[in-house]
Image (cartoon, helix red, strand yellow):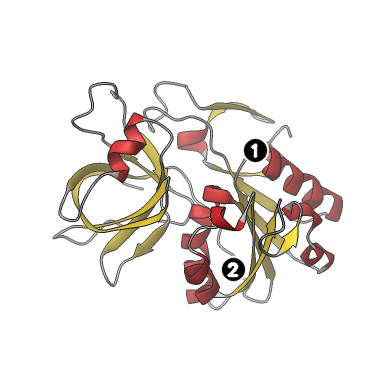
C-alpha cells in the first residue's frame, strides 16, 4: 500500500480526560484508503526536545466525510504538543503504515475484540469496518478504572460492548481474561493493549484453539523499518513491527 506524506488539517479536538485527546483531521483532497490496524507517523513541530515523529494508531477512518481520527495520550513532550493542537492546525502525517487486521470473509463467524485502556484505539476502526460488513462481533474493553475507558458511547453505538475494571467502577471487576463473556464461544479474536493483557488473551486463545491477532505496541521511531527500534523476535526470526506488523497472528509470537 502506498505511503502518503500529507499536511492534514485538524478539524476537531476533543479532550477525553486530563491526559488524552481525540484529534480528527482532514484534507482538501480525498484521504488515501486505510485499513483497521494500520498507523501513522505524526511530525512534531516547535518542540526542540523532540526530533522524531510520533507513531499513533489510526483510531477512526471515514472515507465519506474524508476524516481520520487519532487518540493521543500525553506521555511526553511530543504527545503533549500534539494534544495542544487546535482546530485549523496543520500536522504533517506519513500514512498509512504497517499491516492491519485480517478481515473475515465469512460473516457467520463470531468475533471478539479485546482492548485495554488507550490500546483499544485501533479496535474502534476495526469495529467500524466489521459493522459495515455485517459481521457478528463483541467488544471487551478493560481498564484500571471507569475514567480510563475511552469513547464509551461511540464504541457502544457500533455493537455489543462489555467492560472490566480493576477497581470495579465499570463492568465486572478484574481483568479482561476473567470476564464471564469468555464463557461464550468465539471463532476469532483481535486484541490490542498492554503487553501483559495481550499475552493473557493469547494464552486464552491457544487454550481454546481460537485464531487470534494481536496489534503490538513496540516503540517505533521511523515507521519504515530502517531504524530497527521496534524489532520483535518471532517464530520466523526478528521482524520489524512497523513494517511486518503491527498486527501479528499469535502463532508468530513467542509469548
Callout 2 secondary element? loop
Residue placed most toward the observer, 104 or 160? 160
Q: Is residue 61 visible?
A: yes
First along the sequence among labels 2 and 1: 2
Q: Whole-percent x and y of residue 78?
A: 33, 32
Residues at circles 2 and 1 in contact by the CB criterion of under 8 Å:
no
Crowding around mark 2 (Cα neighbors within 10 Å: few <14, some 14 to 19, many 20+) is few
Residue plotted at (47% across, 70% down) = 154
Q: Is residue 16 left or right of residue 234?
A: left
Residue highlighted by disc 2: 105
Residue placed most toward the observer, 176 or 80? 80
Residue plotted at (81% across, 55% down) = 178
* Quadrant assignment for the C terminus: top right
Q: Is residue 3 visible?
A: no
Q: Whole-percent x and y of residue 133?
A: 51, 75
Residue placed most toward the observer, 77 or 30? 77
Q: Is residue 162 left or right of residue 54?
A: right
Crowding around mark 1 (Cα neighbors within 10 Å: few <14, some 14 to 19, many 20+) is some
Residue plotted at (84% across, 66% down) = 183
Q: Is residue 154 left or right of residue 42?
A: right
User: Which numbered dot is residue 195?
Assistant: 1
**Alpha-carbon span between mark 2 and mark 1:** 28 Å
Q: Whole-percent x and y of residue 71?
A: 41, 51
Q: Is residue 38 left or right of residue 68?
A: right
Relative to 201, say whether 24 is above or below.
below
Q: Whole-percent x and y of residue 62?
A: 34, 67
Amino acid at each position: 500500500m502506498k505511503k502518503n506524506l500529507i499536511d492534514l488539517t485538524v478539524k476537531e479536538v476533543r479532550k477525553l480526560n486530563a491526559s488524552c485527546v481525540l484529534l480528527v483531521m482532514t484534507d482538501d483532497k480525498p484521504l488515501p484508503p486505510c485499513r483497521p490496524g494500520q498507523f501513522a507517523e505524526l511530525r512534531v513541530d516547535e518542540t526542540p526536545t523532540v526530533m522524531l515523529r510520533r507513531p499513533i494508531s489510526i483510531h477512526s477512518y471515514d472515507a465519506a466525510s474524508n476524516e481520520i481520527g487519532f487518540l493521543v495520550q500525553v506521555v511526553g513532550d511530543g504527545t503533549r504538543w500534539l494534544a495542544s493542537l487546535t482546530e485549523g492546525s496543520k500536522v504533517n502525517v506519513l500514512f498509512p503504515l504497517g499491516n492491519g487486521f485480517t478481515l473475515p470473509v465469512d460473516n457467520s463467524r463470531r468475533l471478539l475484540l479485546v482492548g485495554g485502556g488507550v490500546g483499544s484505539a485501533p479496535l474502534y476502526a476495526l469495529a467500524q469496518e466489521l459493522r459495515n460488513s455485517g459481521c457478528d462481533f463483541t467488544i471487551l474493553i478493560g481498564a484500571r478504572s471507569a475514567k480510563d475507558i475511552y469513547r464509551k458511547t461511540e464504541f457502544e453505538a457500533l455493537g455489543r460492548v462489555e467492560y472490566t475494571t480493576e477497581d470495579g467502577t465499570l463492568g465486572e471487576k478484574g481483568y479482561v481474561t476473567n470476564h464471564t463473556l469468555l464463557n461464550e464461544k468465539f471463532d476469532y479474536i483481535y486484541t490490542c493493549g498492554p503487553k501483559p493483557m495481550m499475552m493473557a488473551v493469547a494464552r486464552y486463545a491457544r487454550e481454546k484453539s481460537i485464531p487470534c491477532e494481536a496489534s503490538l505496541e513496540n516503540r517505533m521511531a521511523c515507521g519504515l523499518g530502517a531504524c530497527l527500534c521496534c524489532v520483535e523476535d518471532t517464530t520466523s526470526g526478528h521482524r520489524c513491527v512497523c513494517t511486518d506488523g503491527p498486527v501479528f497472528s499469535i502463532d508468530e509470537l513467542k509469548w
